[in-house]
């Protein structure tokens, strides 16, 4: 039998808790999702649908419409335009990202040719989840699976992230997941400084529009983006709250690192429990027989 992952164990434990005390804090969606032991098929691309407009600004009270993702482009390479026609991050109608609403930002990302990554991408990866989320996860860059599907964290690291989110008693639709850059760096290398700089206005505006209560920062690349002045690395900083313009930020290890170093899952679980505490969620350890 396959060895259980720490996060699988936690989810098991949540299921049992839900059985013995139905008034548990585990949300019904999470229970439903994890009571099904059938391995879920990889998400198929969704048919194209209009993205409902979201008011600009970070007004959560007005309850902006959920983000409906258009389908990804078929797998085909986007040729980089000649430098003379290359548009910099300022996008359609001369608006810069900091003035854009959610739809405009989505369109600007889809059409972006601000750095060399556009030459090798199949799809841009805008982000996924609830644009009004209180909890946001910020990763590094799309990999091969993400590039093909136009969605963040859908490969192996993504499966682990999904389990981590489940163990936190959230589900992917409740949170927002994005990356530091929107296009896949070739051969899964880390994004280069010119690429993160070119993409910076997009993720800054996403954070501004979502205005989450907490950002979980996955790995060193988002740490460098949000806190360029901080010299310490992710190993030193993980588990310690940081502040990004009034938003609480929890740095922790990237799921891809956890796949290579499973022993670090215990540290990450401690970090995630600090985040859960902000939302009044508590892990109830399994009772020993
Ligand atoms: N790693 C990331 O940082 N982001 C993804 O979307 C997938 C893997």
Image (cartoon, grey):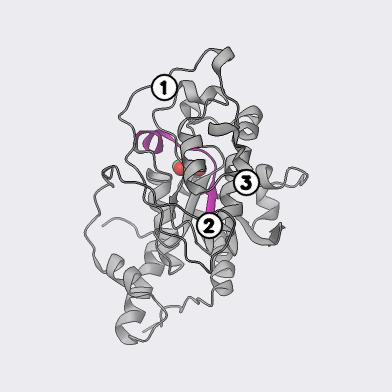
- 150 or 266: nearer the eye? 150
Does residue 87 appear to the left or right of 243 in the view shown? Answer: left
Q: Is residue 239 visible?
A: no
Of callouts 1 and 2, the N-terminal one:
1
- In the rendered image, residue 230, in percent from the top left (x then y), is placed at 76, 47
Q: Which residue is tagged 2?
A: 136
Residue 125: image quadrant is top left
For disc 2, the neighbor class at 10 Å (few under 14, some 14 to 19, many from 20) is many
Task: Point out the residue furthest to the front here.
Answer: 93
Residue 120: image quadrant is top left
For disc 1, the neighbor class at 10 Å (few under 14, some 14 to 19, many from 20) is some
Mark 3: which secondary structure? helix
Residue 87 located within the stretch drawn in magenta? no
Q: Is residue 7 above or below residue 49?
A: below
- In the rendered image, residue 224, in percent from the top left (x then y), is placed at 68, 42
Q: CA distance from mark 3 to mark 1?
A: 25 Å
Instruction: In the rendered structure, find residue 78 and report the number of the disc placed on it.
Output: 1
- In the rendered image, residue 61, in percent from the top left (x then y), is placed at 53, 69
- In the rendered image, residue 265, in percent from the top left (x then y), is placed at 51, 57
- 219 or 138: nearer the eye? 138
Does residue 246 appear to the left or right of 97 in the view shown? Answer: right
Residue in the image at 66% along x and 61% along y = 247
For disc 3, the neighbor class at 10 Å (few under 14, some 14 to 19, many from 20) is some
The region drawn magenta spans: 136-148
Q: Nearer the viewer, mark 3 or mark 2?
A: 3
Q: Which residue is tagged 3?
A: 204
């Amino acid at each position: 039998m396959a060895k259980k992952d720490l996060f699988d164990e936690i989810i098991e434990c949540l299921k049992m808790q839900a059985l013995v005390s139905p008034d548990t804090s585990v949300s019904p969606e999470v229970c439903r999702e994890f009571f099904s032991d059938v391995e879920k098929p990889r998400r198929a691309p969704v048919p194209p649908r209009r993205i409902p407009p979201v008011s600009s600004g970070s007004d959560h009270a007005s309850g902006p419409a959920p983000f409906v993702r258009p389908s990804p482009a078929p797998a085909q390479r986007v040729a980089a335009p000649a430098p003379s026609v290359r548009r910099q991050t300022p996008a359609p109608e001369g608006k810069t990202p900091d003035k854009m609403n959610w739809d405009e930002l989505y369109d600007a990302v889809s059409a972006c040719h601000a750095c060399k990554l556009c030459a090798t991408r199949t799809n841009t990866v805008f982000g996924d989840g609830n644009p009004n989320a209180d909890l946001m996860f910020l990763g590094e860059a799309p990999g091969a699976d993400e590039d093909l599907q136009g969605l963040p964290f859908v490969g192996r690291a993504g499966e682990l992230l999904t389990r981590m989110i489940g163990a936190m008693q959230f589900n992917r639709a409740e949170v927002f997941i994005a990356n530091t850059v929107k296009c896949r760096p070739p051969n899964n290398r880390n994004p280069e400084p010119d690429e993160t700089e070119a993409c910076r206005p997009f993720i800054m505006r996403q954070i501004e529009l979502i205005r989450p209560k907490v950002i979980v920062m996955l790995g060193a690349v988002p740490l460098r983006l949000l806190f360029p002045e901080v010299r310490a690395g992710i190993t030193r900083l993980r588990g310690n709250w940081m502040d990004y313009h009034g938003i609480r930020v929890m740095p922790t290890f990237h799921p891809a690192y956890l796949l290579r170093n499973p022993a670090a899952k215990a540290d990450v679980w401690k970090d995630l429990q600090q985040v859960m505490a902000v939302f009044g969620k508590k892990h109830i350890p399994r009772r020993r027989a």
